[in-house]
Amino acid sequence: MTSPSTTLESLQRRMRAMHSLWYDAVDTMDLSHVNHVERAEVLPIAFSLFHQAQIEDGALMMLSGLPPIYDDSWGDEMGLAIRDHGKERTPAEMTDQRIGDYSAFRDYQREVFARTEKWLGDLDPDELARVVVARPLPEQVASTFSARVAGEQGITVLDGAECWIYQHGLRHMGEVEHARALVGLYGMTS
């Protein structure tokens, strides 16, 4: 059986690796790539970028109790067309997402990622087993991937970090890798 400290060390390494993919992606794109619209009802890269960062920001709040970094001033600074991560909206509603100031977005993303990595670096391994959403799961959570992962007691810190941050981040990185091909860029890994 794997110890909590070994599990935490693995999660820390995987989170840093996932974040490094995001950094590589944003460092090799510009606003013309990010805001490119392939065709109607195909989400631009801008959606995946902001959605992933803001969901990670909110997930960290759920897991750690820290207030989110994002507020209206960030929306102003980034020049977001839609000030919403879009989780409760349809793809059709989010096709107009655009980022106006890519540098400001990158600053926000770096703050979110650094905060997540610091939290994981300071986390007591025994905290991984703490339940953050107990069963019965609320309706909003019951249909999520994390609900499928949850154990008898509910969603733990480990489940939340794995599902809400790591798995979610990789899922959207896959979207970005595909979208990069549509704008003439290469994928991030082989």
Image (cartoon, rainbow, N blue to C red):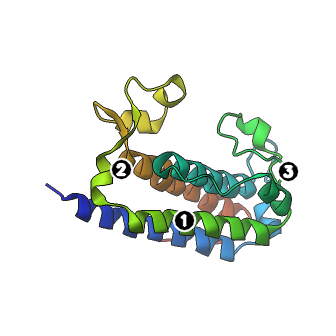
Q: Where is residue 99 in the image (x, y as percent from the top left)?
A: 81, 59
Q: In 3D space, how far apart are the residues under numbered discs 1 and 2 (Cα atoms)? A: 17 Å
Q: Which residue occupies 71% across, 57% down? A: 45
Q: Quadrant of residue 111?
A: bottom right
Q: Mark 3 points at which residue?
A: 81
Q: In 3D space, how far apart are the residues under numbered discs 3 and 1 (Cα atoms)? A: 25 Å
Which amino acid type is shown beneath numbered disc 3? Ala
Which residue ends up furthest to the left in the rendered image?
1
Q: Mark 1 points at which residue?
A: 115
Q: Which residue occupies 67% across, 71% down? A: 26
At numbered mark 1, what does the secondary structure look like: helix, strand or loop? helix
Q: Which residue occupies 27% across, 54% down? A: 126
Q: Name the residue under label 2.
A: 158
Q: Where is residue 129 in the image (x, y as percent from the top left)?
A: 29, 47
Indicate which label's residue lies in the foreground, 3 or 1: 1
Which amino acid type is shown beneath numbered disc 2? Leu
- Classify 97 as above or below 49: above
Marker count (numbered)? 3
Foreground residue, 115 or 91?
Answer: 115
- Classify 179 as above or below 65: below
